[in-house]
Image (cartoon, rainbow, N blue to C red):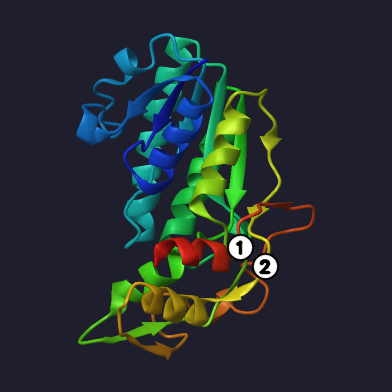
Amino acid sequence: MRIAVAGATGNIGALTVAALERGGHDVVRVSRSLGVDLLTGDGLDDALAGVEAVVDATNGPATDPAETVAYFGTTTRNLLAAEERAGVRHHVLLSIAALSRVKGNAHYAGKREQERLVAAGPVPWTIVPATQFHDFAAMVASWTERDGVATIAPLLVQPIAPADVADILGEIAVGEPQGHYADVAGPEPQDLVDMARRTNEALGRTVKLVPTWSAVFGPEMAGDVMLPGEGARIAPTTFDEWLAEQR
């Protein structure tokens, strides 16, 4: 199949490209750095010529809810319109598990708008909600790190390996549209603070972590809010296995 991956130079996008190419598919990389701009639509029609399926693994700004909703709204409308013109028959969107349970987060607001547009759009679709990735904890800590100290919320999460997410997206893209897919998650719950500590240790970094609900994430995300829902698809790679590969 000829499959396009939007956000192809990002973490999950690049892994999805690799997974599809291993499966023998012809992959079109869609990224602003490669000359295709989802915000303006420039280059989209040429990129999607002959494409049968599109995987949207794009990311966006997450500082202000209105800005984030506007960004995801514009890029998603442009992408879906170009897909309709090209005759694409399957749109696969990477989304976030527990999206409806977190109201105050800018990124979640943008992803909800993205899901709404895809579900109401002209192209048959599958929305794949994933839990946080194994590298999420250290990334979150890096956002607040100053002089070797970082604040981080003690979230309970059930993280998934980025490569497992990419494999699942690739598998779904070559199949028939399924609408709302089950949550996809890793095999076991983890504490975000402990994940960040262990990741930094594996990378040889010394960072003092201060657990708090007054930093990036608030108490509305406490408890089991971030865990996958009933009937989740459990990917195989544990956090320990992923961590061993980072050393």
Whether tag 1 and tag 2 are in contact, CB under 8 A, the answer is yes
Q: Quadrant of residue 80?
A: top left
Disc 2: CA contacts within 10 A as few (<14), some (14-19) or many (>=20): some
Q: Residue at x 60, y 79 (%)?
A: 222
Residue kind at label 2, given as amino acid type: Glu
Q: Position of residue 212 (x, y in %)?
A: 45, 88
* Crowding at mark 1 (Cα within 10 Å: few <14, some 14-19, many 20+): some
Where, quadrant-wise, is the C terminus in this rendering? bottom left
Label 1 and label 2: CA atoms lie apart by 7 Å
Left or right of 192? Residue 129 is right
Residue 182 image offset from top left, x and y in percent: 71, 46
Residue topped by disc 2: 188
Q: Is residue 96 above or below residue 173?
A: below
What percent of the width, then of the height, locates residue 115? 55, 42
Label count reads 2
Q: Residue at x 55, y 77 (%)?
A: 155
Closer to the eye: label 1 or 2? 1
* Most foreground residue, 60 or 188: 188
Picture coordinates of residue 66, whole percent (x, y): 36, 55
Q: Is residue 149 left or right of residue 181?
A: left
Task: Name which of mark 1 and mark 2 comes first in the sequence.
Answer: 2
- Vertical placement of residue 216 versus 132, above or below: below
Q: Which of the 4 quarters of the picture holds residue 89?
A: top right
Q: Residue at x 39, y 71 (%)?
A: 138
Q: Amino acid at mark 1?
A: Thr
Direction right: furthest residue? 231
Task: Give the labeled residue for mark 1.
Answer: 238
Q: Is residue 134 visible?
A: no
Q: Secondary structure at mark 2?
A: loop
For residue 227, say whether it is visible: yes
Dot 1: what SS? loop
Compare residues 244 and 37 and report the one nearer the observer.
244
